[in-house]
Amino acid sequence: MPLSEDEQRILRQIEEQLQRDPGFGRDMHHRSDGNRRVLVLSGVAAVICLVLTVGLLSVSPYLSFVAFIGAVVAALVCERNARSLGEAGLGHLSETMRGRFGPPPRSGN
């Protein structure tokens, strides 16, 4: 069903307004807390797997290798979620962590 002239005019106006608003796409994309949770958990998992890699070297080089692969996978998941959060999301995450664990130490100038 073709659009009437009035509908086409309104559609063109909406398109022009959206083209002039560069922040429209950023406003529409909702960042969930789930991504932040996965980011933190995968970072912790990467550190734990690295510690296991070193600890398992004395037990078995094969187990140590498996732990290293786990650390690489966890780091990749962490990096992927950091990209999806973007700069604003990471800034909010760092502010949240600072609020949770206290203010940063002050420099004695």
Image (cartoon, rainbow, N blue to C red):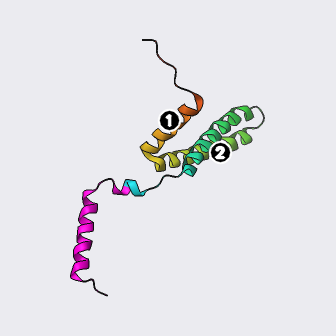
Q: Is residue 4 magenta?
A: yes
Q: CA distance from mark 2 to mark 1?
A: 29 Å
Above or below, 29 relative to 37: below
Question: Of residues 70 and 89, which is closer to you in this image?
Answer: 89
Quarter of the image that includes the C terminus: top left
Would you name the residue on which mark 2 appears? Answer: 70
- Please tell me how crowded label 1 is: few (under 14), some (14-19), or many (20+) other residues with Cα within 10 Å: few
Which stretch is magenta?
A: 1-25
Q: Is residue 98 left or right of residue 64?
A: left
Where does residue 102 sit, x and y in percent of width and height? 57, 27
**Residue found 59% across the figure and 30% down from its top:** 101
Q: Which residue: 53% across, 37% down?
A: 96
Query: Which residue is disc 1 drawn over?
Result: 95
Binning the other alpha carbons within 10 Å of mark 2 as few (below 14), some (14 to 19) or many (20 upward) gives some
From the image, give the main secondary structure of the stretch colored magenta: helix
* Res 15 quadrant in image: bottom left
Identity of the amino acid at label 2? Answer: Gly
Tell which circle, 2 or 1, labels the residue nearer the N-terminal end. 2
Determine the image quadrant of residue 78. Answer: top right
Total number of numbered discs in the rendering? 2
